[in-house]
Amino acid sequence: MATFNNLPITPRFNRPSTTGRTLLEFHYIKGGAYVTPYAINSVYIFKDTNDGSADNWLDLSSASLSYGLVDPANNQRAEAFFMGLGSGDTVEAENQYAPSSNGIYLRDVGKFGIALEEGLTWDFPDTGASATRTFTNATVGKYWDIWTVLDLEDSHPVTYIHSFELFEDTIISLTEPLMVTTRQKLVQKYINKNSKTDLHITATHTVNNTNITPELKNIFNSTILDNAEIRIIHLKDDTTSGPAYTEILAWTSVGVAVNSDDTVIYNWDTQFMDIGMYELQVKSSFLNQTILSDKFNLVVR
């Protein structure tokens, strides 16, 4: 489970519950780099009622001023609504999320997040009418989060549409202890000095219980690792004297991300690193286990 301002929250790809907090992230990449656009005008949450197409929520009249955007006639049908703070300043301070707030948060350059949760309140911009998100059985199912982005001050707003699913119950009931084996692997083996590289540590999980059905085993194809941390040390060259290693990065979760495949990602800048052999290890948690990966060797050359 991820955290948002030190509060637990479930990412969209980790079977979020209708009654819990759901983190909906939006990454903005332009010209091959993360950039922060001029404004995130709004985010709408709509139910998928059109068999996997969000067209029914958009204004598709080519003569309309809101062509390609959310149809104003659908405003009051939104499951939730998030609005920016104003042109050029539409994001809250980084990670300053508070429960039941409906802000759009800048988590890093070009990386935004909103928190969908029970009791969320908002005001619609066209009527000023207030609404509150409440749980019912009808909230189970697939949804759209539609982000309206203003890239430059004088550009036309553009919508970006993503999907997620909410589940009624994410509790698993078993009659025996769960046995899961996790294996991790570092993708990179060599990195050129002065490069800034996303290190990828992949993970595979095997459920070893023979009495668990395939349906339950398939749940572990989603992200299950929590609280990922990373540590990097520089191993001593055999031709030099001194300590056997130097700790370059102490155990930290800062800058460590986990994607929907349970791949741990850490962006490592080697500009000030010495050429030589490094050792990397990842730590995470699952149920009552603390999982330490193998110690992976990595060469900066």
Image (spheres, rainbow, N blue to C red):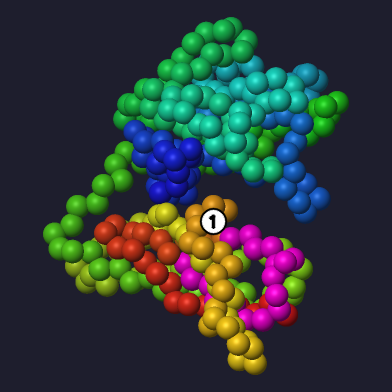
In the rendered image, residue 19, in percent from the top left (x then y), is placed at 34, 33
In the rendered image, residue 185, in percent from the top left (x then y), is placed at 50, 74
Please, what secondary structure does the residue beneath circle 1 have? strand
Q: Is residue 69 visible?
A: no
Find the residue positioned furthest to the bottom.
Answer: 239
Q: Nearer the viewer, residue 54 or 298?
A: 298
**Which picture quadrant has residue 73?**
top right
Q: Find the magenta span and give its range.
A: 266-282
Instruction: Name the residue located 19 percent from the left edge and 52 percent from the top edge.
Output: 173
- Position of the C terminus, as image quadrant, is bottom right
Task: Identify residue for label 1.
Answer: 256
Q: Is residue 293 above or below residue 147?
A: below
In the rendered image, residue 50, in percent from the top left (x then y), is placed at 53, 34
In the visual, does 123 lie left or right of 2?
right
Q: Is residue 87 above or below residue 167?
A: above
Q: Is residue 227 above or below residue 35?
A: below
Q: Nearer the viewer, residue 142 or 182?
A: 182
In the rendered image, residue 294, in percent from the top left (x then y), is placed at 44, 77
Q: Nearer the viewer, residue 65 or 229?
A: 229
**Mark 1 Cα within 10 Å, few/some/many (few <14, many 20+)?**
some
Q: Amino acid at mark 1?
A: Val
Instruction: Name the residue located 34 percent from the left edge and 26 percent from the top edge.
Output: 135
Magenta stretch prevailing secondary structure: strand
Q: Nearer the viewer, residue 48 or 198?
A: 198
Instruction: Name the residue located 44 percent from the left edge and 40 percent from the top edge.
Output: 6
Is 109 magenta? The answer is no
In the visual, does 9 lie left or right of 69?
left
Is 275 magenta? The answer is yes
In the visual, does 175 lie left or right of 208?
left
